[in-house]
Image (cartoon, rainbow, N blue to C red):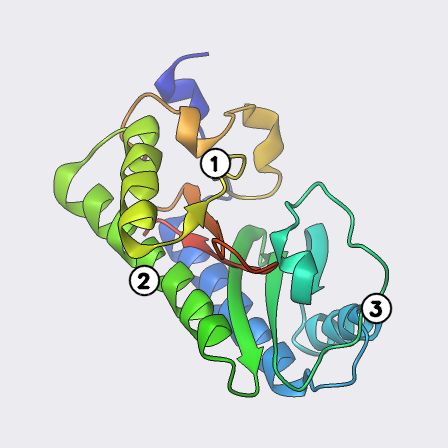
Amino acid sequence: MNAIDKQAVGQAYSLDGMLHAKRMTWQAIEEMARRIKPGMLESQARAMGLEVLKEQGMDRIWHPLLIRFGTNTLKTFKQRSEGDPALGENDIFFIDLGVVWDRHEGDSGATLTTGNDPEMIACAAAAKTLFDRVRDHWEQQRVSGPELYRYAEEQAVAMGWILNLEIKGHRVSDFPHAIYRAGDLGDFEACPDVGLWILEIQIAHPTRPFGAFYEDLLS
């Protein structure tokens, strides 16, 4: 499959539709984050998250809602959480949403903290900072997917974090994007087009058992 095929879209697709899905997904993340409190179990947070999505009128979920607490922030998308931990008073957590709004796929994620642990706060901020640096590199240099993740790893090391290169981004589109079989962003040999790819960043603390996650649409 060539680069054109890997960036194909359906008849419903529009960039405005993708940007609307992005906005709605971030609104849902912000509302979930507002409701997540210390003492809540991961399972309770996920149930709450589904209620938020129903309240906001989603079309459907296209990938499972993930909310990870504490050491589970090191888990990749395909790995299951260890147990059902309660969020601590000084803790870290992330929210990862894949939701269809008006036939378009939103996919965003962010890391937040409770309390005042300085290294957790720094880790959450670093995931967003690294995302921004890589996105800016894409906008300014128009590089390929492998180059984006090479640059991401270089920047992560310079910042003092460990980048998880098992997480390398993916396609989105009008639902369902999966029919295009485009593979990971980090393996896409052309420059990714606007409004079609999710840049994912997952980092780990170099010595402590937690990490942070941030993802959003390249737009």
SS of the residue at dot 2?
Answer: helix
Nearer the observer, 136 or 171: 136
Q: Note whether 4 is above or below 34 in the view shown.
A: above
Q: Residues within 10 Å of mark 1 (few under 14, many from 20)?
A: some
Which residue is identified by label 3?
A: 43
Mark sitting on residue 165: 1
- Mark 3 and mark 2 in contact (Cβ < 8 Å)? no
Q: Residues within 10 Å of mark 3 (few under 14, many from 20)?
A: some
Residue 144 appears in which quarter of the rendering? Answer: top left
Is residue 30 toward the left or the right of residue 52 in the image? left
Residue occupying image coordinates x 69% and y 58%:
72
Which sits earlier in the primary sequence, circle 1 or circle 3?
3
Q: Position of residue 3 (x, y in %)?
A: 36, 19
Which sits earlier in the primary sequence, circle 2 or circle 1?
2
Kind of residue at badge 3:
Ser
SS of the residue at dot 1?
Answer: loop
SS of the residue at dot 3?
Answer: helix
Residue occupying image coordinates x 18% and y 36%:
142
Query: Is residue 46 at all visible to an observer of this figure?
Result: yes
Which sits earlier in the primary sequence, circle 2 or circle 3?
3
Q: Position of residue 117 (x, y in %)?
A: 51, 81
Q: Position of residue 138 (x, y in %)?
A: 23, 42
Kind of residue at badge 2:
Thr
Which residue is identified by label 2?
A: 129
Q: CA distance from mark 2 to mark 3?
A: 29 Å
Is residue 57 toward the left or the right of residue 194 in the image? right
Q: CA distance from mark 1 to mark 3?
A: 27 Å
Residue occupying image coordinates x 51% and y 65%:
110
Q: Position of residue 186 (x, y in %)?
A: 41, 31
- Mark 1 and mark 2 in contact (Cβ < 8 Å)? no
Is residue 91 toward the left or the right of residue 203 in the image? right
